[in-house]
Amino acid sequence: QVQLVESGGGLVQAGDSLRLSCAASGRTLSGSTVAWFRQAPGKEREFVAHIRWSGSSTYFADSVKGRFTISRDNAKNTMYLQMNRLKPEDTAVYYCAATWVGVPTLISGGYAYWGQGTQVTVSS
């Protein structure tokens, strides 16, 4: 049974940084695509970024490009989302998701496994 656990959220001020973690258990992330999505109150869940574990190719939404980066730790089976220069509009619950089938996608339905989410709040 695959489990994804996010951590690292919190309350920060605009311009600050946070690093989110997504730790996987039950299956190695090798061969997967792991993504971050976020959902703000009253809004639909939106794609943030993904990384293809094999080859480390990444893709970011335009809204976070240049501010967010993704990294991974194979030994810990963990992915990280480094968020810099945070803005109030980045406030949301952030979810990590994984899939071992198909091609990397921006669509939430393409991911079978999800974490419980971690809250990020950016004050102005």
Image (cartoon, rainbow, N blue to C red):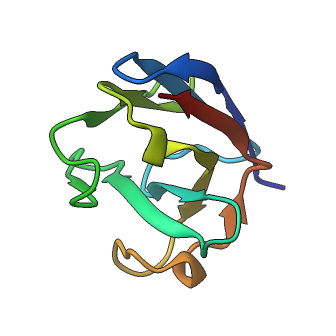
Q: Position of residue 100 (x, y in %)?
A: 52, 67
Residue sitting at x 39%, y 36%: 87
Q: Compared with residue 62, is residue 53 higher up or lower down, i.e. above or below?
A: above
Residue sitting at x 36%, y 55%: 50
Q: Does residue 42 appear left or right of residue 33 in this picture?
A: right
- Residue that sits furthest to the front in the current view: 124
- Foreground pick, 58 / 31: 58
Q: Position of residue 114 (x, y in %)?
A: 71, 59
Q: Position of residue 71 (x, y in %)?
A: 34, 30
Q: Compared with residue 19, is residue 79 higher up or lower down, i.e. above or below?
A: below
Residue sitting at x 46%, y 58%: 32
Q: Position of residue 117 (x, y in %)?
A: 73, 46
Q: Does residue 17 appear left or right of residue 64 in this picture?
A: right
Q: Does residue 58 appear left or right of residue 15 in this picture?
A: left
- Residue that sits furthest to the right in the current view: 1
The quadrant in which residue 48 appears is bottom left
Q: Is residue 104 visible?
A: yes
Residue sitting at x 46%, y 44%: 90
- Foreground pick, 27 / 96: 96
Q: Compared with residue 84, is residue 106 higher up or lower down, i.e. above or below?
A: below
Q: Does residue 65 appear left or right of residue 76 in this picture?
A: left
